[in-house]
Amino acid sequence: MKKTILFLLVLATTVCAQSKQKVVRLSAETEAWLEGDRQKTLELLLARGKSGNPEITTLYNIGYLYSLQGDFTKALSYFQTVIEQESDFTYCYLQMARIHKKVGFIHAAHDDLQRGLEEEDDNINLILEMAEITKELKQIEKTEELYNRALDIDDDNVPALVGLASLYRQQGKLEEAKELLEGNPDIFPEALILQEKANLYRTMGKDKESKRFLKQIILDYPNSKTWSHIKDTLKVLYNMDNLPAPEPLPLYTYKIDPNEELHYKVSYGPITLGWLKVLTKKPEIIGGKTIYPIIFFVDSNPSFGFIISLHHIYESYLDPETLNAVKSRLYTPGSDHSFVKVYYYDYNNNIFEAYAMTEEGRFSYIFKDLPRKVQDSTSMLYFARGLVSDKLSGVTTVVIDEEYKYGQIEYLNETERLSVEGNEIESLKIFARAEFKGVAGMNGDAWGWFTPDQQAIPLKGSIEIIVGSISVEVDEEKTEVPNFHEDD
């Protein structure tokens, strides 16, 4: 498994990806989509479709919106139109299969997926959907082959791991199932994995371990409707009338400074790869709470524009008390590599929603259960500051590409003197690790250095890569990077 980093340096990895970009404005329908207004999005897409020869992605997105609304007849019509024009638009086959599965046409769903896989045999979404269909059709060998195929593409894919482990368990291959589930400790224990572990250990006669995994689900997802039945399971199977309640989330000495502005330089040896700028904006009221927007700009060095041209914007909306993210937005404008995502975190109901526009303009929506404590790549920096201010270590969930990963920060109780802006400053050192696939061959461990006061200002970061290391340090010159974001 490839290993990359966490905290401040997760943003440095983006500087090393190779792509050409230019700034573009988002369309009205994309903005409506990102706000979660599906009806307005559909109306705008339909108007665009009537204005001339609509693009393939416009037709797909209309079909996708109809599908989300439950108007399957119209959705299928649009997906079929797309396929007639571009037979290799594989996501149409995926959506058609999901519709056919919902209405009980299992063999039609199988045929849809088969056609899609003939066009794109390494599409993991098609593979996983086909595995669910073949499992329902009792094609066990084919199902096992499909799950293994998915894991060859993404070796810590949760649905594939759980699906294959469940298959092994039902076949009596308990040790194979255990090895599969326990061999991926770096995935944050999502409820799906915890439930399958509970099923497996109960099958093995280890009720104590099974109960522990079930209890962890209700501690991590206390308000989830999806997992509310776990409470009944614990009562019935284990006579647990007094179920454990989750402890309150920790509060920190560190307080967000609404006027803070941080500047960093990203370097590989003597080469300046780019710059990071962190701005704290005025607080907003979201859901009745005061929330702080943190804007993170990532810009590569224009001197290497012939190789690298990255200009990302990350927006994280943080709860200043728990340092949880309540909303995240990633905007990567461009022509060949353009996408935007907005994540919504509903902790009251343990719901995670992601609205995204992919590189080719295709809309994507993800709905899943949400653990009670979540950081994104920006808020992770502030989570680290909270821990350092109170001299603590901590573990949390990190959202990477709509998936949950395991992240940890270890307070080392070490000090080190750094030279910052001509001054010698005593700093506190931490160690950070996350387990998720990244870009540019990033792997290894990360370290961070912070001021030893309540604000725990990040001064420096370092991460090992395949050859050497990449460093992030305070940009004393506060380099004026060309305003690539002026149209955003």
Image (cartoon, rainbow, N blue to C red):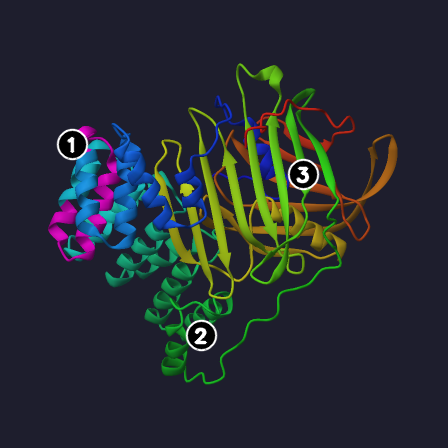
31 in relation to 392, above or below = above
79 in relation to 465, above or below = below
201 in relation to 446, above or below = below
Give the residue type at disc 3: Val
Image spot of residue 167 (x, y percent): 26, 57
Secondary structure under tag 2 reads helix
Q: Which of marks 2 and 1 is nearer the N terminus?
A: 1
Q: Which residue is drawn at 62% across and 47% down?
A: 293
Give the residue type at disc 2: Lys
Q: Earlier in the sequence, mark 1 or mark 3?
A: 1
Predominant secondary structure, magenta span: helix
Q: Which sits in the foreground, 368 or 179?
A: 368
Which region is colored magenta?
83-110
Give the residue type at disc 1: Glu
CA gap, disc 2 and disc 1: 56 Å
Name the residue that disc number 3 marks. 278
Name the residue that disc number 2 marks. 208
Q: Residue at x 61, y 34 (%)?
A: 297
Q: In which quarter of the image is residue 86?
A: top left
Image spot of residue 264 (x, y percent): 70, 32
Secondary structure under tag 3 reads strand
**Does residue 93 belong to the magenta stretch?**
yes
Secondary structure under tag 1 reads helix
Name the residue that disc number 1 marks. 84
Label 2 crowding class (10 Å Cα cut-off): few <14, some 14-19, many 20+? few
Nearer the viewer's eye, disc 2 or disc 3?
A: 3
Q: Residue at x 21, y 37 (%)?
A: 117
